[in-house]
Image (cartoon, rainbow, N blue to C red):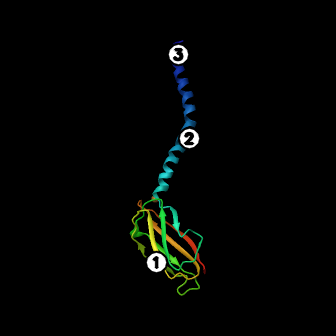
Amino acid sequence: MGRLERSLPHQDLGANLKCDCPDMIPRIVLVLLLLCPSLARAHAILLASDPPDGSSLTNDYLLIALRYSTRIDQGRSRLTLSRPTSQLGGGAEERLALLPSNRPDLIQARAESLLPGSYVLHWFVLAGDGHITRGDLRFTVVDE
Ligand SMILES: [Cu+2]
C-alpha cells in the first residue's frame, strides 16, 4: 500500500508533463510574435510618401517627403532621382540634398526642372538601430 501511494505523485507529474509540452509551443509562438513587431519597428519602413508611389503630377517642381516607421539618421541617408531617359542626363542618378527636417522619422528634398516623363526616386535610409533599408518610388510628370 505504502509503495502505491508513493508512486501516485510520480504518475500525476508524468501526466502533467505530457500536458505541458504541447502548451510550450503556443508559448514559444507568442514570444516570437511579441519579438517580431519590435524587430520590424527597428528597421525603417516607409509609411507614407509625397508623391505617392505610382502617382502622376503636372508640377515641374516637387517637395518630396518620406515618412518612416522609426527615426532616420539624416546624415547617412540619401535620396537620388533618375530622370526620364529622354532628357539631358536622363537615366543618371541625381543625388538630392536633404532638407532640414523637424521630425526624426521624416526626410524631405526638393526636385526641380521636372519635364514630362517617368521618374524613379531611390531612397536609402539608415535607421537608429544601424540597419539600412532601401526602396524605389515611381512617379510620372505629365503635360497639363
Ligand atoms: Cu533593424
Q: Is residue 52 above or below residue 86?
A: above
Q: Is disc 2 surrounded by few (<14), some (14 to 19) or many (20+) residues within 10 Å?
A: few
Find residue 99 and report its horizontal and vertical position in percent.
41, 72
Per the image, the residue denoted by label 3 is 5
What amino acid type is highlighted by mark number 1?
Arg
Discs 3/1, front: 1
Q: Earlier in the sequence, mark 1 or mark 2?
A: 2
- Counting from the top left corner in percent of width and height, residue 28 is at 52, 43
Please give the name of the residue rendered at 55% of the width and 29% of the height, measured from the top-left corner. Answer: 16
Residue positioned 54% across, 78% down in the render: 59
In contact (CB < 8 Å): disc 1 and disc 2: no
Q: Tag 3: residue type? A: Glu
- Three-letter residue code for mark 2: Pro
| Neighbourhood count class around disc 3 (C-alpha, 10 Å): few under 14, some 14–19, many 20 upward | few
| CA–CA distance in space, label 3 to label 1 | 81 Å
Q: Residue furthest top?
A: 1
Is residue 78 shown left or right of residue 19?
left
106 sits to left or right of 135: left
| Spot occupied by residue 131 in the image (x, y as percentages of width and height) | 45, 62
Residue under label 2, please give it: 26
According to the picture, the residue beneath numbered tag 1 turns out to be 95
| Depth order, front residue of 67/82 | 67
Give me the residue at 57% from left, 32% from top: 19
